[in-house]
Image (cartoon, helix red, strand yellow):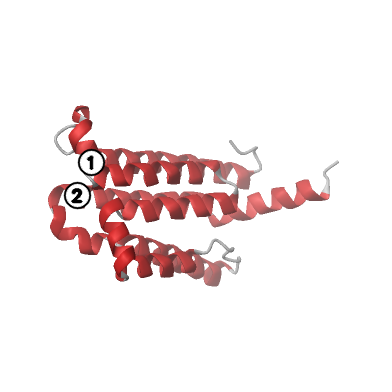
Amino acid sequence: MVTVPEYVDALRRRQRAARHTGSLVLAVHAAAVAVLAVAQVDWGLASWRWQNLVPAVVYVVLWAVVRLRERVTGMGGGRDGFGVMAAFALALALLPFGYLLLLMAGPGVVLGAGLVVVGVRQRSALLWGHGLVLAVVSPLARLGTLDNHAWFLGPHAGATGLGLVALALVVAATRALAAERAVLAGAPAA
């Protein structure tokens, strides 16, 4: 016999799976981190100003996709807080102290913090775990620590580190999509 809390929890899992919240968030973050990795190699210091806007763009895109899906399917968008995170990321990019934080730690810190927040709200270790990794690797890549100490990653170690995180996010997005499809098909989630 299924208890009410178990039923509500299963219903929430099915709703999140139908919205593809985990896989969508991970895929968009993977694309953003890949852009940051390429920008670090190709454009260097000249691109720091627009790189700081990447987290705001990511959360605006996620907010827009959730709202569009809500209008098209009629399914609620959830309370993931993408709009609040977009406003926060934009404020960080435009205000002096936030700009300084992004200049020193990199926009990947904001993306990682956003993944942690969404992961904690959804109780998804897949999201918050990858968010923590991104929040740790981003300052190491931005400040040149990887370039100076991780010689085994090649001549652009910081960009390679961000690229590896992007690859890990793509793999996680694929796993999350498979788990969401399994939940919708009625199979136990992985």
* Residue that protrudes farthest toward the right in the picture: 1
Percent x, y of residue 65:
45, 65
Q: Secondary structure at mark 2?
A: helix
Mark 1 or mark 2, which has the lower sequence index? 2
Query: Image height check: is 168 above or below 25?
Result: above
Judging depth in this view, the residue of 80 and 16 nearest the camera is: 80
Q: Residue at x 54, y 41 (%)?
A: 125
- Left or right: 116 with respect to 187? left
Q: For this rendering, which residue is in front, 92 or 168?
A: 92
Look at the image and tell me whether residue 21 can be seen. no
Query: Label 2 near label 1: C-beta < 8 Å?
Result: yes
The vertical placement of 116 against 149, above or below, is below
Check disc 2: other Cα within 10 Å, few if <14, some if 14-19, many if 20+: many
The label on residue 40 is: 2
- Viewer-proximal residue among 77 and 160: 160
Residue drawn where x is 64% and y is 49% of the image: 13
Name the amino acid, label 2. Answer: Gln
The secondary element bearing badge 1 is classed as: helix
Residue 81, position as x, y percentages in the image: 52, 64
Of the pair 183 and 3, the residue shown nearer to us: 3
Tell me which corner region of the image, top left, top right, bottom left or bottom right, holds residue 185: top right
- Is 2 on the left or on the right of 88, as rendered? right
Residue with the most extreme top position: 152
Coordinates of residue 16 in the picture (x, y in percent): 59, 54
Please count the marks in the image: 2
Identify the residue position indicated by label 1 in the image: 158
What's the mark number on residue 19?
none
In the image, what residue occupies the spot 83% across and 46% down?
3
Quadrant in which the C terminus appears: top right
- The amino acid pointed to by label 1 is Gly
